[in-house]
Amino acid sequence: MNRRMFMKASMAFATLSGMSGLSTLFAQAAWAETDIADGTAKRFDFDVLKKMAAGMAKQPYGGAPAALPETLATMTPQAYNEIQYDASHSLWNDIPNRELDVQFFHVGMGFKRRLRMFSVDDDGQAREIHFRPELFNYHNANVDTRQLEGKTDLGFAGFRAFKKPELARRDIVSFLGASYFRAVDDTYQYGLSARGVAVNTFGSEPEEFPDFTAFWFETPEAGDTTFTVYTLLDGPSCTGAFKFIIHCEEKRVVMEVENHLYARKDINQLGIAPMTTMFSCGNNERRMCDTIHPQIHDSDRLAMWAGSGEWICRPLNNPQRLTFNSYEDDNPRGFGMLQLNHNFQDYQDVIGWYDKRPSLWVEPVGKWGKGTIDLMEIPTTGETLDNIVCFWHPAEAIKAGSEHSFSYKLYWSGLPPVRSDLARVSATRTGMGGFPEGWAPGEHYPKVWARRFAVDFVGGDLKAAAEKGIEPVITTSAGTLKQVEILYIEPIKGYRILFDWYPTSEAADPVELRLFLRTKEETLSETWLYQYMPPPADKRHYVDDRQMTAG
């Protein structure tokens, strides 16, 4: 999974051949040269799609995708990137003064899924858009187009949407590979990804990556900045009907999502509103930051607004071993992967532009009931692999033949759409402990190995609360805490909580740390959660590699 080439589809398993209901509903017709939608018109609405998905769930899964022509199957990433859709054949090219348009991705390389695309008119009539080489410019891709002639069943790999297509040549929404999709804010910089569903991400059974196998696009009016697209999901364990209402706003993209899922078989772990991001290193985790970049990450924290009203900040890690955590909740109000630091100086990256990456916030619509927000962190050696996965895992058992529906909103923006009035965590730092702040380890310090944590809080009513006495409330699941200090930091207009964690055993199990600020009368801050992985007992020492003689 190379993020720079967006090779998500290499993990997909479902195939278009399993869409028997789709084939009977939409018959292929002769190509009309004046319209890229060349199929026979058939009635379509969301109810039709839901019935289709429910019917498919009662049929065996279709299996792996059909083979591509050799000229496409053997492409290099560089060659694939040479293929560009011809903008003169974009989906809504014939709408004067349009605000939106859609273009399609070519199949090839790792993108083997043959997706079907349909255009839906104002009367609810859908016509298929069949593949043909004339829709693309192949440039220096060295594609033998003779192998593609007449292959109208090749379909497409995905689509991307443009806002003000005549002025801005950069897309703002992209659906490509399995059920992955992304959007941007006003920086036009892609970052983390979302998915339709996650299936068995962590557990004894192999993870599945269901596919979006077909899309239906409602035709917008010229001045519309919102468009609606429907999609069919197919995978070994479930099918699904999805409706996306996508608002392309000035500063952000907002998606209203409604899904209806149909289980083919029992599912141990179903992930709703999953998101995938990358965290290589940051203020709190420096192990993999031996580069010219101070920080490397798409997101720096998992934020949660619990059903109880508690606000929680959980900084991300790049652990040395895979970790999985579940946070119980009842009717969550929201959660998301956030990138709150947008200062170029903290990244110094002119390739990834991590300072411009958007956050992604999930706002449940309606009551989701009991479940967990699950977080998996995978060790990674660099920035080309997405190593963080997060989703809502409903407590309700997912049994074969059952149906489940979820509605939610996705906000792709630099900052989340909601924010607590409490003080918030602005940064987390860790380093050597066991000696007074301002000193350095040496002959006398430290006598005992320890790990220091510094958590910065800003905003809220911290200034007004200072007269009442600000108290840090810190707990740990193992070990002991010492050298607790609270410092007012003028440059950030906030408070830094310093403390050292000392082991009380040789165990190297994860340590759960929890911190918030309060006065005697009220809570002042969101809750900081952190999972620390202590080194083995024989590694708990400081290495002094100084050489005091010339060599």
Image (spheres, rainbow, N blue to C red):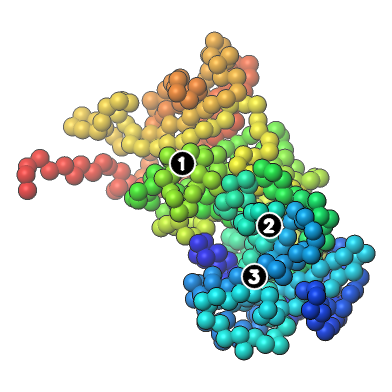
Residue 387 versus residue 364 in the image, above or below: below
**For this rendering, which residue is in front, 475 or 273?**
273
Helix, strand or loop under label 3: strand
> Picture coordinates of residue 60 (x, y %)?
76, 79
**For this rendering, which residue is in front, 532 or 334?**
334
Q: Nearer the viewer, mark 1 or mark 3?
A: 3
CA separation, marks 2 and 1? Answer: 30 Å
Q: Nearer the viewer, mark 2 or mark 3?
A: 2
Which residue in the protein does label 2 denote? 166
Q: Residue furthest top?
A: 467
Q: Pointers 2 and 1 in contact (CB under 8 A)?
A: no
Residue 233 versus residue 38 in the image, above or below: above
> Picture coordinates of residue 547 (x, y %)?
12, 43
Helix, strand or loop under label 2: loop
| Residue drawn at x 87%, y 78% as measured from the top left | 40
Mark 1 Cα-neighbour bin, 10 Å: few <14, some 14–19, many ≥20: few
Identity, as a three-letter code, of the amino acid under mark 3: Tyr
**For this rendering, which residue is in front, 545 or 189?**
189
Circle on res. 344? 1
Circle on res. 85? 3
Residue 387 versus residue 486 in the image, above or below: below
* Lower position in the chain sequence, tag 2 or tag 1: 2
| Residue drawn at x 32%, y 31% as measured from the top left | 434
Q: Pointers 2 and 3 in contact (CB under 8 A)?
A: no
Helix, strand or loop under label 1: helix
Identity, as a three-letter code, of the amino acid under mark 2: Glu
> Picture coordinates of residue 244 (x, y %)?
77, 56
| Residue drawn at x 68%, y 75% as measured from the top left | 135
Identity, as a three-letter code, of the amino acid under mark 1: Phe
Q: Pointers 1 and 3 in contact (CB under 8 A)?
A: no
| Residue drawn at x 48%, y 29% as measured from the top left | 456
